[in-house]
Amino acid sequence: MVVGNWKMYGNLAWNKTLLESLVEGLRDYRNADYAVCVPTPYLFQAQAVLAGSNIAWGGQNMHQFEGGAFTGSVAPHMLVDFGCSYVIIGHSERRELCYESDPVVAAKFEVAVKVGIKPIFCLGETREEYEAGITEEVVARQLDAVLSRVGPDGLAEGVLAYEPVWAIGTGRGASPAQAQAVHAFIRERIAEQDFEVASHIKILHGGSVRVANAAQLLSMPDIDGALVGNASLVADQFIAICRAAN
Ligand code: PEP
């Protein structure tokens, strides 16, 4: 599975070219799931261009409540209205810049499943945490927050994305071996509660996934796909990464 995270980039004309190129470039590739998570105002456009193609679309965030006086926020059912299959939950940029806590991320995961959208649940340690040698402790805490709220069966309704924060947007991603070790840790921790769920759940990798390193990362046994930021903004690059997952 390969998911593009456009972050806060794009405009109508640029999106049109990118989306149409993706449809064309991935038309004959069916062995993996592909999706793009676009800024909220462009969901209608993603739906219009991608409907009927083999590329799904989704949001990059949503509120954990179903409605209310939350100026500027997007309710889960609004993503449903635009045909979203996925929503990114707990991206490090939201955790860090918008102060999203583990309980909020867990609540969002739960409500996404409730409305029928697959959450792409991001977890990963910061550079300071990595350097302090507490990566496993951090991802265990983030994972447990969701697991304790929805249980292993609930978790199975989503997709995980391990993204070391120090690798995001830096061009210096984790090595395949480094990434594999944390993916295996995450899977083992889920297996402690439910072996079946652990063996089937998809754990994507994110953080400077590029054309040059995608195939190697994707060949690791516990890496089931990629969450791609910057490289998803360039059609040829995103298509090449998607093809590497084939
Ligand atoms: C991301 O935004 O989730 C991401 C992984 O970004 P990049 O690929 O640019 O590191």
Image: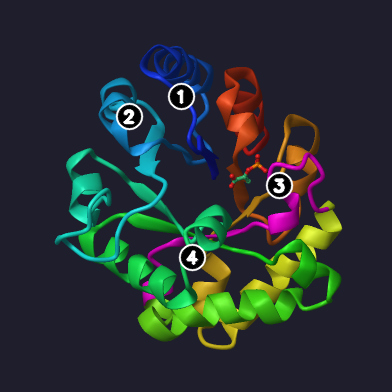
Residue 70, horizontal then vertical, whole percent: 22, 58
Would you say 203 lies left or right of 67 here? Answer: right
Query: Relative to 33, does residue 177 appear above or below in the rendering?
Result: below
Q: Secondary structure at mark 4?
A: loop
Give the residue pinned by disc 4: 99
Ligand 1's quadrant is top right
Mark 3 — residue? 218
Distance Cα–Cα, label 2 vs label 1: 9 Å
Residue 232 placement (x, y as % from top left): 58, 31
Q: Residue at x 76, y 72 (%)?
A: 129
- Magenta-span inclusion, residue 173: yes
For discs 4 and 1, the disc positioned in front in the rendered view: 4
Crowding near the residue tagged with mark 3, few <14, some 14–19, many ≥20 C-alpha atoms within 10 Å: many
Residue at 33% in and 38% down: 40
Q: Amino acid at mark 1?
A: Gly
The answer to whether mark 3 and mark 1 are in CB contact below 8 A is no
Q: Which residue is mark 1?
A: 10
Q: Amino acid at mark 3?
A: Leu
- Is tag 2's residue or tag 4's residue first in the polypeptide sequence? 2
Q: Check disc 2 and report its element: helix, strand or loop.
A: helix
Whether tag 3 and tag 4 are in contact, CB under 8 A, the answer is no
* Range shown magenta: 154-174
Asked if the residue at label 1 sits under 8 Å from ligand 1, the reply is no
